[in-house]
Image (cartoon, helix red, strand yellow):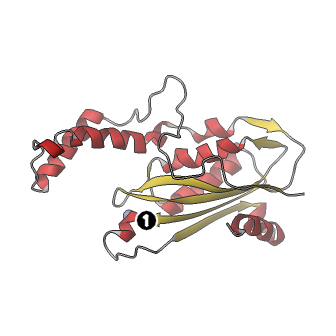
Amino acid sequence: MIAQIDDAILSGPPSFEAITQPPGVPAGLRVDVARAEQAVRDLLCALGEDPTREGLRDTPRRVAKMYRELFAGLDEDPARHLSRTFAEQYDEIVVLRDIHFASLCEHHLLPFMGRAHIAYLPNDRVVGLSKLARTVDAFARRPQVQERLTSQVADALMEHLNARGAMVVIESEHLCMKVRGVNKPESVMVTSAVRGLFRSDAAARAEAMTLISRSR
Ligand SMILES: [Zn+2]
């Protein structure tokens, strides 16, 4: 039998409101908002702008708070999400597809966004589906590169879920490719990370890949 869950809980456009911090822990603790605010003001000056003109007056504060939100994952331990498992006699593949996410490319500080697809082989214990989505968010809300994001999610599934196998495929569009540099607005980057049984067992890998890439 195969468990298959279409359309993750976090479907629709990526929402930065969706992330939930543990109670009492404000998002973006590591971000020094006052310092970031000053840096944005300096940047505006460096670009030849006048940060005191009406349209830009609140921009430094707004941008500083935005970064605090975008980097909220720095304060989050994904193990927290994945530790809430429950015992289940189910040893077939679990797939969660189309987990929308948005992240920030650490080379240009421009967003990249798209969908993550997760497959794992449980080891007596399974995790709530929303926790898989939150794990993606926790790693996405940091200065990132897509390759590392993909590996981190797969490694977290292996480590914290004690999964027998994990596969993560991420498709995303990078603003730094679309609006600058090579200016290729239609390009989509696809990365995958394969761990455990999905790496050693070709049939299991093929089954996971089929479930992940079924027509959407
Ligand atoms: Zn970039």
Q: Where residue 55 sits in the image (x, y, percent)? A: 17, 45
Q: Nearer the viewer, residue 63 or 216?
A: 216
Classify residue 68 by image quadrant.
top left
Asked whether, in this view, residue 178 is left or right of residue 3, the answer is left
Q: Is residue 206 left or right of residue 78?
A: right
Splitting the image into 4 quarters, where does residue 26 fall? top left
Q: Amino acid at mark 1?
A: His
Residue located at (81% from left, 66% from top): 204
**Position of residue 197 measured from the top left corner of the image (x, y, whole percent):** 78, 61
Element on which disc 1 rests: strand
Could you tell me which quadrant the N terminus lies in? bottom right
Can you say whether 13 is above or below 35 in the image? below
Residue 136, percent across and down? 58, 49
> In terms of image quadrants, where is residue 99?
bottom right
Label 1 CB less than 8 angstroms from ligand 1: yes
Determine the residue positioned at 29% across, 43% down.
63
Q: How far from the left and from the top, in percent, is residue 137?
A: 54, 46
Q: Ligand 1 quadrant? A: bottom left
Q: Relative to 202, does residue 146 appear above or below in the rendering?
A: above
Q: Is residue 50 above or below residue 108?
A: above
Task: Report which residue position mark 1 lands on.
Answer: 174
Residue plotted at (52% across, 53% down)? 13
